[in-house]
Amino acid sequence: MPTQQQRSDATREALLAACRALLLAEGVEATTMAAVLARTGLSKGALYHHFASKTELIAAIYKAESKGAIARALARAEQAGAVSPLAQLTWMCAAWLEEIRAPDVAAILLRIGPAALGVEEAQRIENANSLALFERQLARAAEAGEIGAIDQPLAARLVNALMTELAVASLRERGQPLPDVERLILGVLKGMEGRA
């Protein structure tokens, strides 16, 4: 018999899955709390126990999508056998760029999330998931002697911005091969050396 926590987690996941499906199929405006309830068959009480508003529900979906894309990219970089911190960073970024080409992932991270939450809030959520990771990898690369003296927090923000711009560009040009992410990131980092 499932525990109360397991039932609560299952309810939350059902709400997230229903809202995600509606957002992708119908768009932000047509996705209402009533539509989520109709799709799940759950009560208003169950919905509002987990999410106070549609915005809060969409934020949870956006966070999960962001974390999921990053986790899958990290796993792919680890499977590729990156041996140095800088190689891990560049391979993870390239894998993330491939992740973002998936239509559902791109729709949530680049269109639905920013439209529903506002660009600043979507960026804050994305930064919470990716920026700290970039900062850790750059610190590890500096410790390993792979990069020179750079302003690591600024470098992390530049890599983060570069990846966002590459994602948008790659979606506009879906038929084109992905850019050489490693070369681009290394160029940014090299250009920053000696300016810390």
Image (cartoon, helix red, strand yellow):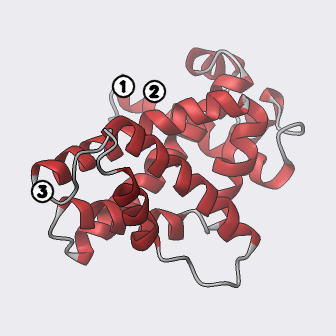
Q: CA distance from mark 2 to mark 3?
A: 48 Å
**What is the quadrant of the N terminus in the image?**
top left
Helix, strand, or loop for circle 1?
Answer: helix
Left or right: 65, with 131 as reference point = right
Question: Mark 2 near mark 1, Cβ–Cβ under 8 Å?
Answer: yes
* Element carrying mark 2: helix
User: Would residue 31 be visible to someone looking at this image?
Assistant: yes
- Residue 145's mark? 3
Three-letter code, disc 1: Gln
For badge 2, the amino acid type reads Ser
* Residue at image point 61% right, 45% down: 17
Q: Position of residue 172 (x, y in %)?
A: 76, 69
Quadrant in which residue 37 is drawn = top right
Foreground residue, 107 or 154? 154
Asked whether 92 or 69 is in front, the reply is 92
Neighbor class of circle 2 (other Cα within 10 Å; few <14, some 14-19, many 20+) is some
Q: Residue furthest front?
A: 194
Q: Which residue is mark 1?
A: 5
Q: Residue at x 61, y 68 (%)?
A: 101
* Tag 2 residue: 8
Seen at 21% across and 44% down, the residue is 139
Q: CA distance from mark 2 to mark 1?
A: 5 Å
Asked which secondary structure carries label 3, the reply is loop
In depth, the one of 51 and 154 nearer the eye is 154
Q: Tell me which label, 3 or 1, sits earlier in the chain.
A: 1
Q: Position of residue 33 (x, y in %)?
A: 78, 28
